[in-house]
Amino acid sequence: QVQLVESGGGLVQAGGSLRLSCAASGRTFSDYTMGWFRQAPGKEREFVACISSSAATYYADSVKGRFTVSRDNDKNTVFLQISSLKPEDTAVYYCAQSKDRFQPMGSLGREVGFWGQGTLVTVSS
């Protein structure tokens, strides 16, 4: 049984930073692409970033240069360092794992096999 547990969300002022973590269990973590999505109030869930099993990274245009995704395969954990936060970054941030081993993750989330429960990030102006 795959479990993804996010942590690190909270309330932060605009311009601040947070580090989100997602601890995974249940499968060989290093074989799977890990991703982050977010859902703002009243909006659809959107892709933020992902990191492949080979540590290749991809970002949504809206977060490039401000967010950094990384992984620690020894700790079965994926991270999202979010900096220069803006009020429009306010959202629930979800961790995701690809369905299949070595499978890329697209921005529509169709390749996602498992989701975390989400962690709320609130950015005040």
Image (tube, rainbow, N blue to C red):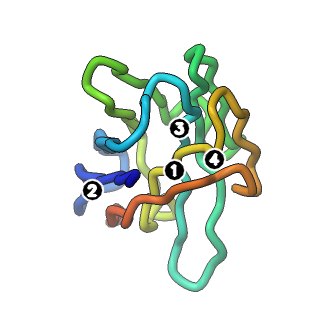
- The residue pinned by badge 1 equals 96
Mark 4 lies on a secondary structure that is loop
Q: 56 and 38: which one is in front?
A: 56
Q: Is residue 117 above or below residue 105?
A: below
Of callouts 4 and 3, the N-terminal one: 3
Q: Is residue 3 above or below residue 45?
A: above
Q: Is residue 70 above or below residue 78?
A: above
Of callouts 2 and 3, the N-terminal one: 2
Amino acid of disc 2? Gly
- The residue pinned by badge 4 equals 99
Q: Which disc number belongs to residue 7?
A: none
x then y, percent, for residue 68: 48, 29
Amino acid of disc 4? Lys
Of callouts 4 and 2, the N-terminal one: 2
Q: Is residue 83 visible?
A: no
Image depth: mark 4 or mark 2 in front = 4
- The residue pinned by badge 2 equals 9
User: Label 3 near label 4: C-beta < 8 Å?
Assistant: no
Instruction: Tell me how far mark 4 sits from mark 2, CA to CA.
Output: 25 Å
